[in-house]
Amino acid sequence: KKIIGRIEMYNQAKNKLKDCPLIRIGIFGNTMSYDSYASLKEAIEHAGIENKLNTQIMWIDRLFDSNEEIHISEFDGVIIGEGSDFVNEKLKIIKLVREACIPLLAISYGSDLLVKEFCENVLKLKFLLPGVEKPFKRELIKNKMYLGGKQTMLLSGSYISKIYNSLSVNERYRLCTWIPNEVFEMFNDSIRVTGLTNEKYPAVFEITGGEFCLGVKFHPEFNSRPGKPSS
């Protein structure tokens, strides 16, 4: 009897997805080389296999770079990655996706932009990025690097707790900016903090009253594995 290795089994599972329903995921990162966002691309692939979906990644960066017209309706979901490049372009995409009620996941620095976009376009409050002068209470805190696997406590009944089916998760971080807790006090629950680190840093944000619109300071893709995709 032929023994099939794990890589061969994984490749066979990928090949079976060709006849499965197609789902298009738009990613806006800060670079477009083949190796860019390798963990994120593989995590999407793992999730596709688990859910029997043929996943297609569409790089939004490339559309801006080539001045192509962007049709938001082409995407079944959008991910805003880390990185401080293309800030204005990312904010534009976040606004379009949010208003079109397309599922949106913003990761690391991308989650800061999610809050900034909603704060300025919906709540009409100015929100400043690092390096900009005060008012400090609506400015990101630039801190030392926060790295590695960290415990994150999730709010009961929140979207994120239902996704993980848990009130506590261990995810990996790689960042150096935080939104001050007092900023969220001005939002009247229109943006809720639904996850905190052990140091009480706000780590998960949810925009209420709409479709899936979620920001996370950690990198869920880093813990994804074949046969065990990230939540």
Image (tube, rainbow, N blue to C red):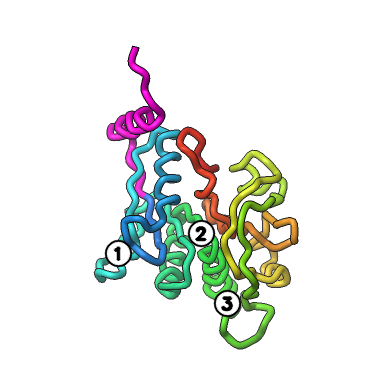
Provide the residue span drawn in magenta: 1-24
Image quarter hosting the N terminus: top left
Image quarter hosting the C terminus: top right
**Residue highlighted by disc 2:** 106
**Residue highlighted by disc 1:** 62
**Residue highlighted by disc 3:** 124
191 and 49: which is toward the camera:
49
Q: For the residue labelled by badge 2, is the local secondary structure a helix, a strand or a loop? A: strand
Q: Say if the magenta span includes residue 167.
A: no
**Residue 105 horizontal/vertical position (percent):** 50, 55
In terms of sequence position, does the residue under pointer 1 or pointer 2 come before the other?
1
Q: For the residue labelled by badge 1, is the local secondary structure a helix, a strand or a loop? A: helix
Q: Say if the magenta span includes residue 12.
A: yes
Q: Could you give the CA–CA distance between mark 2 and mark 3, rounded to whole angstroms?
A: 21 Å
Quadrant in the picture for residue 68: bottom left
**Residue 213 horizontal/vertical position (percent):** 53, 56
